Amino acid sequence: MMKFFHKLGSPPYFYGFAGRLAPWLGIICLILLVIGLYDGLVVAPTDYQQGESYRIIYIHVPAAWMSLFIYMVMAVCAVLTMIWRVKIAEVIATASAPLGASFTFLALVTGSLWGKPMWGTWWVWDGRLTSELILLFLYLGIIALYNAVEDKRTAARSTAVLTLVGVVNIPIIHYSVIWWNTLHQGPTVTKLGAPSIDPRMLIPLLLMAMAFQFYYFAVVLMQARAEILERERNTAWVQQLPEVNGP
Amino acid sequence: MKEFLYMGGYAFYVWTSYGIAMAVLIINLVLPIGRRRRLLADIARKARRARRSS
């Protein structure tokens, strides 16, 4: 097991491994997405308070979960970058940032589109919405910083510091609906004890969450492969790739 | 079907959400594919040039 992780840390091995794994993750994602969308849009019952508008939940909540999950992945990569200088950790963190920004953007936009009919406003400056907006700025700042530094290994170390500083925002986002008065509803799924949501509504939510999860794993591997290729373009193993050398 | 698309009067909010989500997912999927393809083409071109000049 340790040997496998050790091998995974080498760029040529990771490049090949990710290339074989990504299509399977993509297929699982597609299956989950199709079932989840059908289940969420057609099978799940109408909400007695919010009518059909609540169906935005199947995008909004999984996207918001992903925005936090991806940040935590980047934070773990940041630690591996700072302490052990693991190249693959740098690559995964870099590949994750645009995906994290995308899911944060999605959570904010769908939240807004849900807030307008339900709360009567597109936006309020409350704890949850503001801290999630700060998360978007963190992602954008990390991307900008990485691109601003010429040497990619120095860039990765600088962004690792910024990533770790931004971790403080994660518990703030999570607890914001408990700490501060807000229009945003409290947690219904992740709180302790049984979730206070109808199982017929919960199942499509979990399916969509898993679909997004697999989507992230598949795409981050693809993005990581491109990043490895760019960083290692002058090495012997890249020059010997069949994609480069011809068959 | 018409009733399904109508979404109880929330069609605009629901379908815009799903539409933007699908657009974001597709864009993020296409970007790395294009990036890798361009890189490979560029690396292969430079490798051919290096072989010819040596």
Image: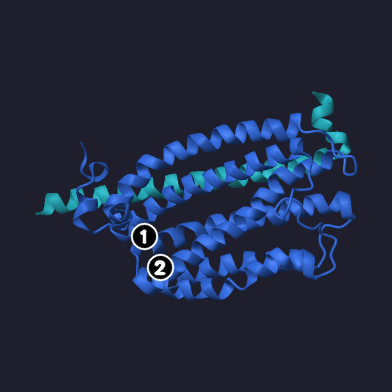
Please tell me which residue is depicted at 87% across the width and 50% down the height of the picture.
A118
Coordinates of residue A150 in the picture (x, y in percent) = 38, 72
Give the foreground label among 2 and 1: 2
Up-down: is A37 above or below A175? above
Which of the image's four quarters has the C terminus of chain A?
top left
Left or right of A180, for residue A66:
left
Residue A111 makes an appearance in the image: yes
Residue A19, picture quadrant: top left
Please tell me which residue is depicted at 12% across the width and 54% down the height of the picture.
B53
- Give the numbered dot on residue A49: none
| Colour representing chain A | blue
Residue, far top: B1
**Amino acid type for the residue under numbered disc 2:** Leu
Left or right of A25, for residue A7:
left
Coordinates of residue B31 in the picture (x, y in percent) = 48, 48
> What distance separates the C-alpha of mark 2 from that of mark 1?
9 Å
| Chain painted in cyan in the figure | B
**Amino acid type for the residue under numbered disc 1:** Ile
- The residue under label 1 is A88
Left or right of A42, for residue B51:
left
* Mark 2 residue element: helix
Residues A38 and A5: in front is A5
Residue A134 makes an appearance in the image: no
- Please rate how many residues cluster around mark 1, counting C-alpha atoms within 10 Å: few if below 14, some from 14 to 19, many from 20: many
- The residue under label 2 is A80
Up-down: is A2 above or below A81? above
Residues A176 and A14: in front is A176
